[in-house]
Amino acid sequence: MEFHERLEALATKVRNQADAIGTEEATKNAFVMPFIATILGYDVFNPLEVVPEFTADVGTKRGEKIDYAIVRDGEVQILIECKASLGALTLEHASQLFRYFATTNARLAVLTNGVVWHFYTDLDAPNKMDAKPFLVLDLLDIDETLIPEIQKLSKESFDLDSIINAAEELKYVGALRREIASQFRDPTDDWVRFFTTRVYDGMFTAKVREQFTGLVAKASKQFLTEQVNDRLKTALGAGVVAPVTEHTTAEVSSEPVAESDLSRDTEIETTLEELEGYQIVKAIACSEVKPQRIVHRDQKSYFAILIDDNNRRPIARLHFNTKQKYLGLLDESKVETRHAIDSLDEIYAHAEAIREAVRRYV
């Protein structure tokens, strides 16, 4: 498999198994060792390449161990410290990495819970590990722009100079993107003030701040929706993508719009979450049928995903209009069973049922 395919295969495994992994050792066996072996390409059973429980005594600290050290040409190049997959990563978890970084030749350190991977180097001071990672990889939400940088860490393509040279830009661009995403989700007063003072000439009072907090959040949502439309148009090529707004239905079809479609209720709201769910179902179904045959049609009560834009060929239904979200799957008799889901990632747990539904029509 290609590098990105191996990464996606491991990501699928993480999605399916993360909730069942409760200990650090289980995390190492299920996620970390496969990452080292299949993604980075090192032989986890060859101590000349991967040293488990690596020891390098630091001052008065004796016998402390780093979970893994990756060796190239007899020199330690990457240190890896692991934590249990159910726990969030914190700077305190990196304390051993900080100490060991200065006592080895390693220029790269990794802190991971098997799901999220923080990559560090020494940009701020030579031979002293930075407090902030230059790259963050989340296997539950892979940023495709980072894949070439991850590949540089692999045995086949290892390029330390290129990694270090790109690290500073990656560090700050990544941090900025995460901050922007946070502001889009929950804008702070400073963020609201920044935009308000550029479009509003009056004083920025408490009342104005309250009014514009909602407006900034709404404008942010509309901007993201427009970006999704643009990506859909690019991904689907010749498919016709009607703009997604708060009061229109997004239609995707390579066929001319039928007269009956023109009378469809225009008050239906297609949400960004529904479109993201559609993309997940489509990605699963593409193993069985060409992607252009998979389209969506929003209804008042559910969001339908169909083969050939045909209501008699349903793949799945997304019921996202209530607090509890459901994935609806239909059997051969078109009888629907709803499966409660708390996040979009849980759709992957029903991948085989989705593929089976597609196979009925091909």
Image (cartoon, grey):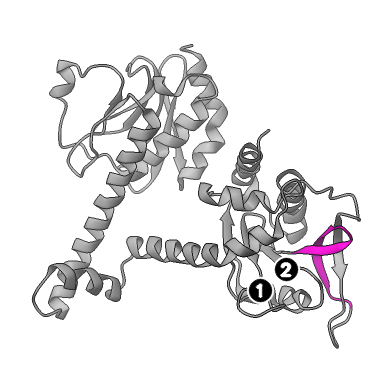
Q: Secondary structure at mark 1?
A: loop
Magenta residues, dominant SS class: strand
Q: Quadrant of residue 122?
A: bottom right
Residue 277, percent across and down?
Answer: 41, 38
Name above or below for residue 234 compared with residue 225.
above
1 vs 210, left or right, is right
Q: Quadrant of residue 322?
A: top left
In the rendered structure, which amino acid carries the disc numbered 1?
Answer: Asp
Residue 181, percent across and down?
Answer: 39, 60
- Circle 2 packing at 10 Å, graded few (<14), some (14-19), many (20+), is many
**Residue lying at 84% horizontally and 84% vertically, measured from the top left:** 61
61 vs 109, left or right, is right
Residue tagged by mark 2?
107
* Closer to the camera in the image, 72 or 296: 72
Q: Which of the labelled discs sits on residue 122, or is there none?
A: 1
Q: Quadrant of residue 96?
A: bottom right
Task: Tell me, yes or no, whether the two marked residues, 1 and 2, touch with CB atoms within 8 Å.
Answer: yes
**Residue lying at 27% horizontally and 57% vertically, measured from the top left:** 220
Q: How far is the residue under mark 1 from the one under mark 2? A: 7 Å
| Among the two numbered marks 1 and 2 on one chain, the one whose residue lies closer to the N terminus | 2
Q: Is residue 320 visible?
A: no
Q: Is residue 158 visible?
A: yes
In the rendered structure, which amino acid carries the disc numbered 2?
Answer: Arg
Q: Secondary structure at mark 2?
A: loop
Q: Which of the labelled discs sits on residue 208, or is there none?
A: none
**Residue lying at 33% horizontally and 19% vertically, measured from the top left:** 309
Name above or below for residue 283 compared with residue 103.
above
Q: Which residues are magenta?
A: 63-79
Name above or below for residue 143 compared with residue 315.
below
